[in-house]
Amino acid sequence: MRAAGLGLALACLATISFAQERAGEGPTNEKAQKAYKDGMEYLRHRNTDSALDRFKKADKEDGGHCLACQKQIIHYGAELHDWKAAESAAEEMVAQAQGQRDTAVAHYEFGMVLLNEALSKHKDELFSRSHEEMTKALAAVPKFPAAVFEDGRVLAYLKQDEAAKAHFEQFVQMSPEESVNRQRALLYIKQPELVRALMAPPFAVTTLDGKRLSLDDLQGKVVLIDFWATWCTPCRAEIPHFVEMQQKYGPQGFQVVGISMDDDAKPVKEFYRQFNMNYPVAVGDDKLAQSFGGVLGLPVNFIIDREGRIHAKYLGATDVSVIDKAVSALLANP
């Protein structure tokens, strides 16, 4: 019964932003506290490079015992591809973990750092190390859904497809039907080789009109994911063109999805009405942005093909005719 309870707790934990600080996790050293506070201030101004440096300093000043610092270093180290810092912080977490739950979480987070690093560097040795960490997480808490799913992905990258399928089948059995990863796991059971394709990450959002929208619900369509914000000038310039594209290509199986990175939904709703936006828009968060590899600067656009694979990524202001041409080409191949 205790293991089942831990599994449920860990399932809930997976829905919370890992960088979020919990009570008692912050630094105790006075200098470390100041450095950590400075880091949080840098984050408020979207200066992640400087924030990461301050979190590193805070953890060092605290003797490597600041769990909140380590979480931030893992999160933003991975986002900025500072793999050395992310790995070091994850190793500290593992060394300090006490009890089954914390041990499982620490090994899982270390495994995720190694998985993302492996995807960035294309090194099998990193996938193997990630698998080792996920195995340790599951040894501590066997019913840890996130670890089961991610270890399935790792095994697929290592081309151990039968073992990967077994993990995805196990994940489906322990996950609620509305889980976005459950939808993706069902797809991977049928075609584990899709893990090795550049698949767009599964996600579900609540749109401005209160409806739930998941990426896998749009399977079979060509999708444009637009990360934007109301305060972003090039974003504002693109949106009328995306409205035109939705009207022009929608009947052919095209769908724009806007993910606003505004801190508040109110200006987004006003902008939505003002620009007569004809496609679903949701307010995103850091966790969603991180699942797409981090969104550093806006706008960021992703074109997803009918199979759910990332066809193209555009950073910053882009000639909309380039995006239009890419979409048109994908729609021509049903």
Image (cartoon, rainbow, N blue to C red):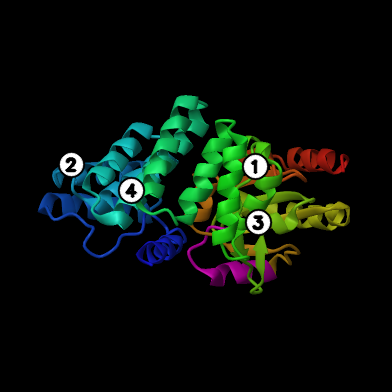
Q: Disc 2 or disc 3, which is closer to the eye?
A: 3
Q: Between disc 2 and disc 3, whose residue precedes?
A: 2
Residue ID at (20%, 46%): 58
| Magenta residue check for 334 | no
State the image coordinates of residue 132 (x, y, percent, origin top left). 40, 36
Q: Between disc 1 and disc 2, whose residue precedes?
A: 2
Circle 3: element type: helix
Residue at mark 3: 183
Amino acid carrying label 2: it is: Lys
Circle 4: element type: helix
- The span from disc 1 to disc 2 (Cα, nearest Å) is 37 Å
State the image coordinates of residue 173 (x, y, percent, origin top left). 58, 59
Residue at mark 4: 106
State the image coordinates of residue 276 (x, y, percent, origin top left). 74, 67
Residue at mark 1: 199
Q: Disc 4 or disc 1, which is closer to the eye?
A: 4
Residue ID at (88%, 57%): 251
